[in-house]
Amino acid sequence: MPPDHSVHDRPGLSFLGTGYLGTTYAACYAELGHRVIGLDVDTAKVAALNAGTVPFHEPGLTELVRRGLASGRLEFTTDPAVAAAGADVHFLCVGTPQRPDGTGADLDQVAAAVRTLAPHLHGRALVVGKSTVPVGTAEWIERLLRKHAPDDADPEVAWCPEFLQEGHAVDDVLRPDRIVVGARGDWARETLARVHDGVHELAAREGREIPVLETDFATAELVKTAANAFLATKISFINAMAELCEASGADVAALARALGHDSRIGPEFLRAGVGFGGGCLPKDIRALQARAHQLGAGAAVRFLHEVDLINQRRRERVLQLAGELLDRTAGPAGPELAGSRIAVLGATFKPDSDDVRDAPALAVARMLHGAGALVRVYDPLGRENARRSHPELAYAESLEAACADADLLCVLTEWAEFRTADPAALAPLVSGRLVIDGRNCLDRQAWHAAGWTYRGLGWKEAA
Ligand code: UGA
């Protein structure tokens, strides 16, 4: 997309934290004509980005980063003074992981980013939160800024949540389906309106309009977690129905199709399977529960605990199915799988990503390994990240190598490579023609026709 030519007065922007969120925003806003600085504490990452290497997989992003660098509008630095001097608006894009005790969000990186930037600010500056945070964080940041900024600085806070999906992040930034602006004053709102000129202009050129919702801080912060909680609930709802289908003989895929035709329900996020994972949905539903509890409103989101439990049970169901298919007796701790060779196909939390954070596929691989199985994992893009986080598992370099002599295949991430694999070609490689389709993504008939015993999640094999 060529940048608009009326871009000379776009505000300068900095993005604090050059992970998946900050890097995508930085590159996209440079493309839209802003002067952009990405700030990070990780010198190796900053050096790689300045050399045009994106250290994670996101379609289209490398090209944008390289174009931004070549245009001179995009630069990455570890120096907060450079970010403060070169930008009028500073976006907080650092991670807010789950705390090690498993409850609320860890805001250490947010605090560190604010403390690092604040002493370098002078005059009027806008600090905008993008990271997913517990409601109430914006006011806390206002206090932090007041404490750490010099006397001649007049920083203001606003909140502008992001809704990026990995694998679609570039498009989600350039073509957002809504913009939420939580701000206190007119100056912050007007400044953010100028920041968003570029995406509105692009939308106008494409005959679209982007709704802008102006809210208070708390609403803007809550929109993001509420959206993720809703999506997680929708997935766990269909997975709960999957349990019911397994018990009753109904078929969850057909059920989901029928439900999805109701426009009030819609077909999205009704894919039953081994459940949700990733760096967002699981941690966000837990952080929301923790924050609601602190606010005295814990009862309002207690159902999210159930959403989490349904999600975890789908992982156990794969283990149970593996025991059934391999004809192993189950002890109190689940099936005993000692000596069975299992190919786990998929390691990432979803296809077209190399992200293995809280990936259901890897969690199941570990459970199978824990039950004594000889597990071999293959993933087209996530192998290296998986190997780093779970070195105890064995990894194969190809689908065929993973399948060689396997007693059972478990498809746990719906990569195109697995969906389109020819079951007749895989059959001679394996010891047992047994397959568990943990994402209901394979062509059941084709696998049956090639002589496989096939099990999916959410329906009962006819006797
Ligand atoms: C999610 C949200 O979809 C984004 O809107 C949000 O901005 C982002 O988190 C975030 O907080 O940053 P993402 O984690 O990239 O995006 O992944 P999703 O596409 O939402 O998938 C999450 C998980 O749910 C995956 O493990 C996927 O396999 C699973 N899923 C999704 C299902 O099991 N069934 C479905 O029908 C849909």
Image (cartoon, grey):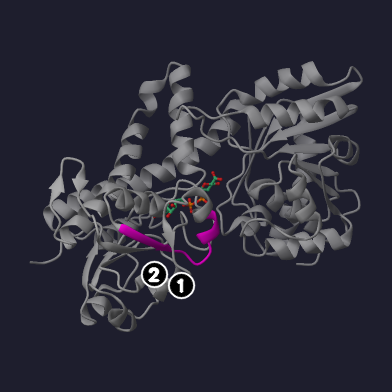
Residue 260 found in image quarter:
bottom left
- 432 shown above or below 14: below
User: Does 170 lie within the magenta span?
Assistant: no
Residue occupied by mark 2? 402
SS at badge 2: helix
The mark found on residue 165 in the picture is none
Whole-Å distance between the Cαs marked 1 and 2?
6 Å
Q: Position of residue 102 (x, y in %)?
A: 45, 30
Residues in magenta? Answer: 374-385
Residue type at mark 1?
Ser
SS at badge 1: loop
- The foreground one among 385 and 85 is 385
Residue occupied by mark 1? 398
Residue 89 found in image quarter:
top right
- 149 on left or right of 231: right
Farthest residue in the front direction? 339
User: Can the viewer see residue 234 in this picture?
Assistant: yes
Q: Residue at x 22, y 75 (%)?
A: 452
Q: Position of residue 8 (x, y in %)?
A: 91, 53
Q: Residue at x 83, y 21 (%)?
A: 149
Q: Position of residue 189 (x, y in %)?
A: 75, 34
Q: Is mark 2 within 8 Å of ligand 1?
A: no
